[in-house]
Amino acid sequence: MRRLWVGQVDSGLTPGLQVCNLRTKAGRLGQNAAMKILIVEDEAKTGDYLKQGLSEAGFTADLVRNGLDGMHEGLAGDHDLLILDVNLPGLDGWQVLKALRAAGRELPVLFLTARDQVEDRVKGLELGADDYLVKPFAFSELLARVRTLLRRGRSKEVERLALADLELDVLKRRASRAGQRIDLTAKEFALLELFLRRQGEVLSRSYIASQVWDMNFDSDTNVVEVAIRRLRAKVDDDFSPRLIHTLRGMGYVMEIR
Ligand code: CA
């Protein structure tokens, strides 16, 4: 199946969404029906695409195209989740997020950031966002994050990911194993975060490349192998049990074996 990337949308997307529509129509009055999502996105194509996709997945999706409207809608308080672009005209995403949190609005916030802005991700999480996606991303990825956030609800605790004695503090950007602090580069951190979020799932090299390096193609995934080797040297080589496993011809999986 052709993969759709938000932010790289073209005229080819409509048939895919129509197929999706047929599949989900029956579920419209299901559990998603009451869930209202606010999208704040100034890029017309991306905004329309998200609104359409989320509607067809059974959510009620409202779209506004600037930060000021986003803040007013968010403050009105009838949404269950906010999808917030960072670069917006007028008020930017950070100002919107600050205003909402200052007013005590606790809805989960998923923000959308431009490629490779690591500082952005840290800043957003520090300001009280719950998750982020780097553009361009696959719609299926957004949908998975949205569902997870809605299930989880807004949590005030610091987000920690863990497997065995390996721990990752997403907010403080700290990793440790068996209580020992491990220094990671930004890419290694992103890679480890991906493994921990998807523990037990087989991740292909091209998928990892798309998530961590924003490369949407299958070529040159050697960079993935090199990074995984480095990550293993830091989190696995001196510890037991080993957590990152290679599945020849398929990819990698993080799990306890
Ligand atoms: Ca924008």
Image (spheres, helix red, strand yellow):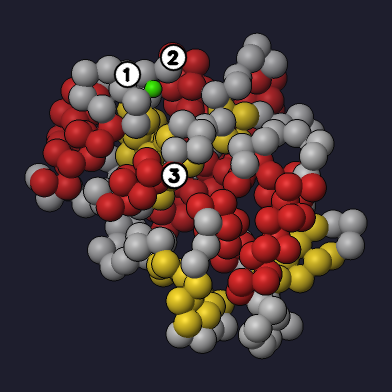
The residue sitting at the left extreme is 103
Say which quarter of the image contains residue 99: top left
Q: Determine contact: label 2, label 3, CB under 8 Å.
A: no
- Residue at x-position 61% and y-position 37%: 214
Give above or below for 162 relative to 186.
below
Within-10-Å neighbours for mark 2: few <14, some 14–19, many 20+: few
The residue sitting at the right extreme is 249
Q: Which residue is mark 3?
A: 118
Q: Which mark is residue 199?
A: none
Spot occupied by residue 220 in the image (x, y as percentages of width and height): 79, 39
Q: Which mark is residue 65?
A: 1
Upstream in sequence: badge 1 or badge 3: 1
Q: Determine contact: label 1, label 3, CB under 8 Å.
A: no
Say whether residue 194 is left or right of residue 15. left
Is the N terminus in the top left, top right, bottom left or bottom right quadrant? Answer: top right
Q: Nearer the viewer, mark 1 or mark 3?
A: 3
Upstream in sequence: badge 2 or badge 3: 2
Disc 3 element: helix
Spot occupied by residue 239 in the image (x, y as percentages of width and height): 64, 85
Say which quarter of the image contains residue 19: top right
Q: Which mark is residue 44?
A: 2
Amino acid bearing label 1:
Arg
Task: Give the CA separation, mark 1 to mark 2.
Answer: 8 Å
Task: Give the CA separation, mark 1 to mark 3.
Answer: 24 Å
Q: Is mark 3 within 8 Å of ligand 1?
A: no
